Amino acid sequence: MPETNPSQIIVIGSGSAVIQEKRFSPSFLWQVGGKNVLFDCGWGTGLGLVRAGIKLQGLDHILISHPHADHLAGLISILHAIHVSGVYYPATKKTNQLFLHGYPGFMQDYETLRKMMFPERVEEFEIKVDEFTDEVKDYDGLLIKSCQVPHMPEHFVTVSFRVEVGDQSVVNSGDCGFNQSLINLSRKADLLVCEACIPPALFTQGPRPNHLSPFECGQIASLAQVKRLVLTHLYDNFTEEEAKAEVAKNYSGSMILAADQMAVGL
């Protein structure tokens, strides 16, 4: 179980859409200022949170970058589990508000999933759903910034999120190709959690429009002058040494290859 830290990232899932034994789909938690902020929520997220010692009732904000299953599939199961836990173990009931933040169209997707998987409106706490494009919203000192990024634009809009609390900032790329908007959003962030699923061998054939390579993650981190870079969305099709070598071609800062249950202090 990760050690207690006043401000830390816990990697819940460092994998991809492929179901792997040691990697859940992309998701990480930022514990900061007494809040639990969850970025993305694919398959395995609920179990990963429990394994990390995080009570699901303690979640305050959940940010969803886009509707692919490896970023969204775990959301309703978590909400359902929070409710059922409160029924059978009354002491665990959640009473404080939960904020759900997502891409354009997220409200409708959320309602569709609720109707299919958890149609009862039985929560004893309020759920507030917001959509983001390119904007800034303040939630009692927790500042959320977003930008649209290229991933699958012919099907849906994808957003990257930046969360700021005090003088600390964390950015989640979500899934995307190389783009200036993510560089601008990540400017001087304390931590950039960046997808890096294109292996170096494939990148030599040219960049991809909807995913990033370690080389491009290093470019983004360098141009944005981020303090630390975490690579995630991994298929285990390149080694940590290969990733570090590719990142170092552009970025001289600290780089971490994510692993499930890893804790990174800010």
Image: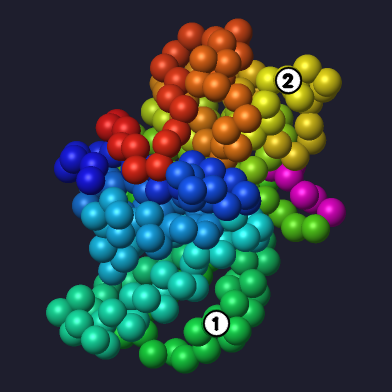
Residues under numbered marks 2 and 1 in contact, where contact means CB atoms less than 8 Å apart = no
Mark 2 or 1, nearer chain start: 1
Could you tell me which residue is drawn at 50 percent across and 65 percent down? 74
**Figure check: 100 above or below 236:** below
Residue 117's x, y, as percent? 55, 82
Report the magenta residues as a range: 149-154
Residue 14's x, y, as percent? 49, 42
Q: How is the image coloured?
A: rainbow
Q: Is residue 104 visible?
A: yes
Residue 162's x, y, as percent? 48, 42
Residue 160's x, y, as percent? 58, 44
Q: Residue furthest front?
A: 21
Residue with the mark numbered 1: 117
Front one among 233 and 110: 233
Could you tell me which residue is drawn at 33 percent across and 72 percent down? 97
Q: Is residue 153 magenta?
A: yes
Q: Secondary structure at mark 2?
A: helix
**Figure check: 32 above or below 194:** below
Quarter residue 263 falls in: top left
Quarter residue 234 falls in: top right
Q: Nearer the viewer, mark 2 or mark 1?
A: 2
Residue with the mark numbered 2: 201
Label 2 Cα neighbours within 10 Å, binned few <14 / some 14-19 / many ≥20: few
**Figure check: 47 above or below 122:** above
